[in-house]
Amino acid sequence: MPPKGTPFEKRPAPRALVDDLARAIVEGQAAKVPETDTEAFLHGADSTRPASFLVPVGPALKERAKAFARETFLSLGHENLSEATCYGVREYMCGCQLDMHFDRKETHHVGMVLCVDSAGAEWPLIIEDAQRELHAVQLAPGEALFFQSASLLHGRPWALSRGSVCNLFVHFRCR
């Protein structure tokens, strides 16, 4: 069922959640792994370096992020949310580019992008609304974007010019 409610909105995340995620990123650097299932839409500066890494975070921290996302989506009018998906933190590397895309229509009807760290880099998410108007949404650390990720075209169609950007993603299917 298509999602109901606000198409996209930016909100602040709980400070304690963001701080704990930032600590998890530092502690998880040795365990981070290059992402290999994103080649269709995420590209690195060259083929010798990964475009992104997945930094593991513990299950309790994922549950806190999912609870924050669920509460916010409900407050935005999204109903009948199924169980959430949360993979961990994606660390985008300098030079990577995220093609415009839709998220998985079967499982990712609505999504939250929580910026945990951006190392001062500006790399807005471009979202095309239902009227085909483009919006550039810049997220600072501690800000989250809630949006209809399977029905709104989105991406970062130019390369991250410096540093890295760390985001946590939570997705829900609407029943």
Image (cartoon, rainbow, N blue to C red):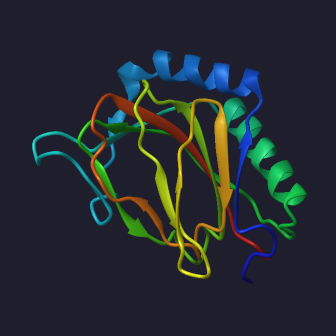
Quadrant location, the C terminus: bottom right
Relative to 47, is 18 on the left or the right? right
Q: Write down the quadrant of residue 4 in the picture.
A: bottom right
Q: Where does residue 107 sit, x and y in percent of width and height?
A: 61, 70
Q: Closer to the camera, 99 or 9?
A: 9
Image quarter of the N terminus: bottom right
Relative side of 104 to 161, left or right:
right
- Name the residue rendered at 69%, 31% in the picture: 61
**Residue 22 percent across, percent down from the top left:** 57, 21
Q: Residue at x 65, y 71 (%)?
A: 109
From the viewer's side, name the closer residue of 71 and 175.
71
Q: Quadrant of residue 92?
A: top left
At a point 46% along the width and 30% down the height, the residue shown is 118
Say which of 105 and 98 sits in front.
98
**Residue 23 placement (x, y as % from top left):** 57, 16
How many numbered marks does the figure carry?
0
In the shown orientation, is residue 11 left or right of residue 161? right
Q: Is residue 46 above or below residue 64?
A: below
- Residue drawn at (39%, 25%) of the image: 31
67 sits left or right of 37 in the view: right
Percent x, y of residue 172: 70, 62
Q: Is residue 9 above or below residue 96?
A: below
Q: Quadrant of residue 95?
A: top left
In the displayed structure, 129 sits above or below 47; it is: below
